[in-house]
Image (cartoon, rainbow, N blue to C red):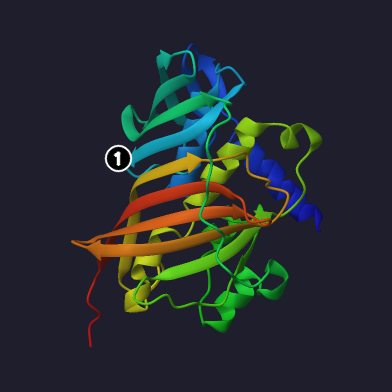
Amino acid sequence: MTETAHVAVEELHALLTVEEIDTGIFRGIASAEQPGRVYGGQVVAQALAAAARGIDPKRQAHSLHAYFLRAGDATRPIIYRVLPDFDGGSFSNRRVVAMQGGKPILNLAASFHRHEEGLSHAVPMPEVPAPEQCPGFQEALAAAGQKLPPFLLERLAAFEIRPCPPVRNGDLPQRHQWFRLAAPLSAALAADAVMQRVILAYASDFALVSTALMPQGLGFFSPGVTGASLDHAMWFHQTPPLDDWLLYSMDSPWSGHARGFARGAIYSRNGDLVASVAQEGLLRVKPQQA
């Protein structure tokens, strides 16, 4: 484990720690020095971090629903306005508007629930090779003749990712990949259930909607393909064990009308369902000239 990995995890923590600048108003720091579009997972994660401020720590986020409205500028801070809509006996609800230049770029609603015991069941984790049997992310891309843009390598520097070999499940496009933080959590962060959910929200946006391109043999960075997240929903079933491997199992039951829909399930290594995710994205393909 390198010092670079430790620095990347610390920088991710700093990126996702929002600053309160007035009552219900928070600021998220810029993520890049070069012009570019803000990664959607960053805005969702920072908005969730802002929503969680002031919530009783006995209540943890169990769901969020977000709409992406405008592309954000990665070189500028983002302002988050939190509306404390509801605090009941068991649940709290917050709305968040993320803004740049006086215009909203994302709307998010998050719900928080105090711990309760109750009936339980979960779909079992798919049978896939262990992370030790899967190649590293860049190795897998190189084998497929692909290369990630530098900005994406920087975005993923805090994570170790290992894609599983492709599997077929009838006509359902499906992919699985293991991921974990590239360096261990500090003791303080390991005890911070809020930040662990925030980090998982950040990671949940990566590669999900591109699953909808698989039937055409395309990816987000294929020539002629342009894409963007339209909305993002997430349900947290438990605090994620980020120090260990997590399996992100993704599928896409539908695409059409320049949109693609994808679902995700995130499991701990021991098979517990940690979170469920759903997303729709804009997917446009420009015909290639002969």
Residue 241 in sight from this viewpoint: yes
Closest to the observer, 286 or 92: 92
Residue occupying the point 40% across, 66% down: 211
**Residue 126, horizontal then vertical, whole percent:** 55, 65
Q: Residues within 10 Å of mark 1 (few under 14, many from 20)?
A: some
Instruction: Locate residue 117: give its quadrant.
Output: top right
Residue furthest to the front = 119
Q: How many marks?
A: 1
Q: Horizontally, is 217 left or right of 190 in the view?
A: left
Closest to the observer, 47 or 225: 47
Residue occupying the point 58% across, 79% down: 142
Image height of 268 relative to 190, above or below = below
**Residue 63, horizontal then vertical, whole percent:** 45, 35
Residue 75 in sight from this viewpoint: no
**Residue 235, horizontal then vertical, whole percent:** 47, 41
Instruction: Locate residue 154: give its quadrant.
Output: bottom right
**Residue 143, horizontal then vertical, whole percent:** 57, 83
Secondary element at image label 1: loop
Amino acid at dot 1: Leu
Residue occupying the point 23% across, 88% down: 290
- The residue wearing badge 1 is 69
Question: In the rendered view of the protein, which quadrant contains the N terminus?
Answer: bottom right
Closest to the observer, 157 or 278: 278
Residue furthest to the left = 257
Residue occupying the point 80% across, 35% down: 187
Instruction: Locate residue 104: give its quadrant.
Output: top left
